Amino acid sequence: MKSYIKEKIDTFRMDNENRARLLINCPDQPGIVAAVSQFLSEHNANIIESNQYSTNPKGGEFFIRIEFEMPNLKEKKDSLEAGFETIKDQFEMEATFKYVDQIKKVAIFVSKEPHCLLELLWEWQSGDLMADISLVISNHETSREIVESLGIPYYYIPANKDIRKEVEQKQIELIKQYDVDFIVLARYMQILTPNFVETFKNRIINIHHSFLPAFIGAKPYERAYNRGVKLIGATSHYVTNDLDEGPIIEQDISRVDHRDNAEAMKKIGQSVERSVLARAVKWQLEDRIIVYGNKTIVF
Amino acid sequence: MKSYIKEKIDTFRMDNENRARLLINCPDQPGIVAAVSQFLSEHNANIIESNQYSTNPKGGEFFIRIEFEMPNLKEKKDSLEAGFETIKDQFEMEATFKYVDQIKKVAIFVSKEPHCLLELLWEWQSGDLMADISLVISNHETSREIVESLGIPYYYIPANKDIRKEVEQKQIELIKQYDVDFIVLARYMQILTPNFVETFKNRIINIHHSFLPAFIGAKPYERAYNRGVKLIGATSHYVTNDLDEGPIIEQDISRVDHRDNAEAMKKIGQSVERSVLARAVKWQLEDRIIVYGNKTIVF
Amino acid sequence: MKSYIKEKIDTFRMDNENRARLLINCPDQPGIVAAVSQFLSEHNANIIESNQYSTNPKGGEFFIRIEFEMPNLKEKKDSLEAGFETIKDQFEMEATFKYVDQIKKVAIFVSKEPHCLLELLWEWQSGDLMADISLVISNHETSREIVESLGIPYYYIPANKDIRKEVEQKQIELIKQYDVDFIVLARYMQILTPNFVETFKNRIINIHHSFLPAFIGAKPYERAYNRGVKLIGATSHYVTNDLDEGPIIEQDISRVDHRDNAEAMKKIGQSVERSVLARAVKWQLEDRIIVYGNKTIVF
Amino acid sequence: MKSYIKEKIDTFRMDNENRARLLINCPDQPGIVAAVSQFLSEHNANIIESNQYSTNPKGGEFFIRIEFEMPNLKEKKDSLEAGFETIKDQFEMEATFKYVDQIKKVAIFVSKEPHCLLELLWEWQSGDLMADISLVISNHETSREIVESLGIPYYYIPANKDIRKEVEQKQIELIKQYDVDFIVLARYMQILTPNFVETFKNRIINIHHSFLPAFIGAKPYERAYNRGVKLIGATSHYVTNDLDEGPIIEQDISRVDHRDNAEAMKKIGQSVERSVLARAVKWQLEDRIIVYGNKTIVF
């Protein structure tokens, strides 16, 4: 990683060494917020941002994300998490503490078209994506130069459907070697096996070049053109084993008209893809997304 | 029709008695624009607006819409149209002259939910839809009061799939009686038979409450909610015998998030439906839409 | 008020007789959320929605809006509010309980152009604005028919700058007679005196037909046209004694191009005005807006 | 310039060696389109796209942009332009032929913040901006590395208001040396002298980080934050000697809320700035913009 990017990340880590996020989901019932905020208050936490949602206040599922600051957080982590166990048990919570200075490690997969990768790299070197982009894996050599120029390792692993298993084996090894937190498919045009998807459940973010559930699968711009739509879109979602059916994180669209052929739609759409994927990755880095069933709650 | 609306229409007709639109499509080849504009120029036409499009300048299909003013247009109509026959033949054109002071007659079909009907009536009484809304046909009584208060005849024709044929027979009679130019399905929730659709080919405009081709058919908001989409939309299209597959005129979307259940999406969506349908109807009234295959060119 | 609207309101009130909102602002410090949620929990409140914001977690101003349900709320109101006094004092809070079944009384002021008034009436009769529209006051007779047809009293008070004082005297009397909660200026084109504005501080919502702070004052569409802008907008804000300088509640824009003259911009803009004002009024009815200095927090 | 970019440009030039654009403005009168299209037709031109606009069909100003293909254009240029003189004189036209294979030479000026420059470079290396980016001039060294890595000369010319004249002298020399067609101020934060502006009239495109005419001048995000706006924007315009008052080419906005401080608005705004400037530059390269008075017609 280039030194000026490293500096930005180091500064960010220092600025946020006392900052954490608590993510909870549990069956809804009275008293949850009171118990949690009481707990945080007793530990001298200062709440910075708090968002909550309930599928149904009478017996539904409750979700909360609290971002807080706490003096000397580093030394208190263990006692904080241990102390929270009682509340966790009482309300049957799934609860996770996330520490903001633990920068997440990301692997980006890309095929030939570089626009989504480039957007992520651009946001990253501007300091807008606080991630450790640990490696880029591609079945093409196209993006090697730009990736390596930023000090990121680039792995070329040719792929096709006949050697899928071996390819994924190499990819999994690399991801483990770099201890990656999540994977971004930045227009990686190979289908992943159920084994790969299971290995990184809710940890693979894809960008699909259509407004899902319209135009699932291949060649969405051609099909959008043939259907004569007046808007085209892009969708960022977690990957599951049902093609383009995973929990949607973000979507956006752009207007087109009769003058735009499939090629023009593709150009227009690339700009939407870039921003939709960048937003999804940013929210993932900020621990804003909770997957619940086949949907996401984005706080 | 209320007198203040009639006045607006009369004023509009007088202001536009010398204004016409020429809509053409033909195989593309050099010389079309030259021939047409030469012809109009010789007839003292002043071109107000001109839009053209070619699917492919080398042997594709060519489309043009020219709006022009011509002194004493009323007396010249016949000689104008007769004189144009030569050019029409030379370039194998489909060509139509539309006279702006010939206000189009519209029938609106509606079921229970009145929001799209109300938007059209609202735009109409504001003078933004220059139409003769000749009648409203509904399988419910819900909207009778508001429709009749504007001086528009309201026909209640109960409908269900067992009596579809008789219902459509009555509807067709009414449409012929009122000499209607086109039909707007403003959330009319009955399926039309192939016979009805054929009778009014490219003359029935529907609003579908989803971003087509996503969520074709029934209950799109429920299905959008279940899929966890982050955007919902509406689509206005011409009706064909393939459900929700006709040529799309206009689409738009609105942003939703995890807090919006199906009911909330419906509310948000209604606002999109209203504006999408109103735009499509306006373009139809202004002769801006050309249907070509399963697509529209909107000038 | 028409009986079918009254029925909708009555149903809404019954459905929400146990629902309230608590709005708080106070100096930020640790423990606020804990204390408040503890208090609500002890009173068996079920939190439906909660939003908070701090201008600065270290010594800024803290804001929270909590919507909750509480069994037998009606009987508990007094003890609830009395019990909260301790917390209020402890944290130096401004705090208000709002009861959802207490439908707010609204006066709408309008001049000649009816589009914003009509939008509010439309949303209202659809059940989307849960208000008691108690009266409409206008310096023109234009909208009398539509307003009275919905069972709303219409007061015609001619106005000009020479008789401003007498006019406002009559208006104030009417507003007091109807015990109005807040006033909506739905394109009311008279300037209000400082006395009037003071009398209803933060209780007058205006719609200005530009994207403030651009084009403050008269004829914004003409000036937008002359400046050659590519977007026009509308702004809803609370009225203060500085013309068009009050706290902004909501803004939106629409795209225009060189073909749109001032008249076309006005038509396009009216649609933006309608939706921007309707959103602001809805948020006011739902107690979502907190005024802080010259800004709004919209939860 | 890197070889892969050069290749894209060379391919584009070859693909378009027979393509040209004719831009005309003249007093409106009947017969213009007929004469021009007749002329093009006689020269075997195939019209690809044609857009026209009149400020007023009765005696206003008329504008047209025609893009066409013509076999062996290169050899015909002189006779084409000479032949058009008669029509030009007859209708008192300003008329220019632009040849698509004559790639425009561009100088980009930038200060510290690189986001707009980076967007342009990104679009350029993707083949979406068909320009010869001849040089970058900056009063900082910040962007040297990225610019030079793409094979573009980078000139560091320190600037401040005391040495404005000498600085601009150097800049003008460089622009003349590279024979630049137009200049893009991609967040160049120095004021230009009237002399400089006059030298490149309607040939300097600026991006201003606000929705003009709101927040003219310095620190627009701070002022937007202080005013409590709910939308922020960016404006691309030609530079004149009235600060931020030149003809607007394009504008766009993004939504903000009370949680966004000036710093957050700046981040959000940068994304708007990037796309607004990129669109304006693209339209300039495609000869789509005609300046008329203090406005632009964008075809």
Image (spheres, coloured by chain):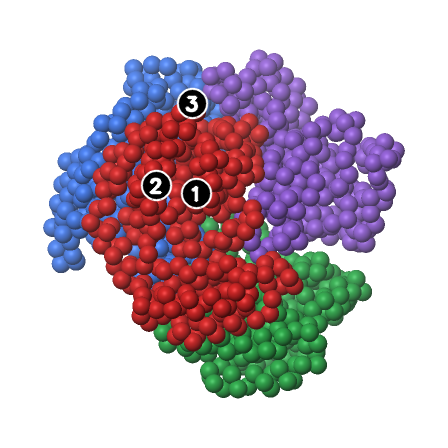
Chain colours: A blue, B green, C purple, D red
Residue C30 drawn above or below residue C140:
above
Please state if A166 lies on the left or on the right of B251 as rendered: left
Neighbour tally class for label 2: few under 14, some 14-19, many 20 plus, Cα within 10 Å: many
The residue carrying mark 2 is D175
Q: Residue at x 33, y 17 (%)?
A: A73
Cα distance between the residues tagged 2 and 1:
10 Å
Q: Quadrant of the C terminus of chain C?
A: top right
Residue A204, image quadrant = top left
Percent from the top left, x then y, of residue B292? Answer: 46, 74
Percent from the top left, x then y, of residue B110? Answer: 63, 66
Residue A78, image quadrant = top left
Percent from the top left, x then y, of residue D212? Answer: 54, 39
Percent from the top left, x then y, of residue D140? Answer: 33, 28
Q: Chain of mark 1?
A: D
Q: Residue at x 70, y 78 (%)?
A: B74
Frontmost residue, B240 versus D74: D74
Q: Does any portion of residue A141 appear in the rendered image? A: yes
Secondary structure at numbered mark 2:
helix
Circles 2 and 1: CB atoms closer than 8 Å: yes
Q: Chain of mark 3?
A: D
Tell me the amino acid under the disc marked 2: Ile
The residue carrying mark 3 is D162
Neighbour tally class for label 1: few under 14, some 14-19, many 20 plus, Cα within 10 Å: some
Neighbour tally class for label 3: few under 14, some 14-19, many 20 plus, Cα within 10 Å: few
